[in-house]
Amino acid sequence: MKKIWISIIGVVVVIGLIFLGFTQLNKSTASSSSSKKTITIGTTGTSFPTSYKKGNKLVGFDVDLINKAAKDLGYN
């Protein structure tokens, strides 16, 4: 009987998390629909020549590749 209650609680938690995820996704797409689409990419910026800092700007092959792909897809 205890296993059944644990299973029911687990299913309710999973459904709640899915609902929360869709709610947050809807909020983020609604707020960005009026502005241009943006992709945010993370990198260490310390691995020459793929991504490194030159002055205050991040440059390198990875940065160029992501910028080109984002531009082709219509993103910032």
Image: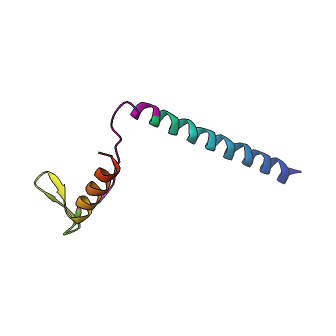
Q: Where 55 falls versus 31 (above or below)?
A: below
Seen from the viewer's position, the closer of residues 16 and 38 is 38
Residue 27 % position (x, y):
49, 33
Which residue is found at the position 42% from the left and 31% from the top? 31
Rendered image coloring scheme: rainbow
User: Number of numbered discs present?
Assistant: 0
Which residues lie in the magenta part?
Answer: 30-45
Instruction: Give the residue furthest to the left.
Output: 55
Q: Where 29 falls versus 40 (above or below)?
A: above
Q: Where 38 falls versus 45 (above or below)?
A: above
Q: Quadrant of the C terminus?
A: top left
Would residue 61 be counted in the magenta stretch?
Answer: no
Residue 72 % position (x, y):
31, 53
For residue 66, which quarter of the picture? bottom left
Residue 51 % position (x, y):
22, 63
Residue 49 % position (x, y):
19, 69
Left or right: 15 as drawn, with respect to 21: right
Magenta span: predominant SS is loop
Seen from the viewer's position, the closer of residues 46 and 30 is 30
Which residue is found at the position 23% from the left and 67% from the top? 50
Which residue is found at the position 82% from the left and 47% from the top? 5
Left or right: 64 as drawn, with respect to 8: left
Would residue 31 be counted in the magenta stretch?
Answer: yes
Which residue is found at the position 19% from the left and 55% from the top? 58
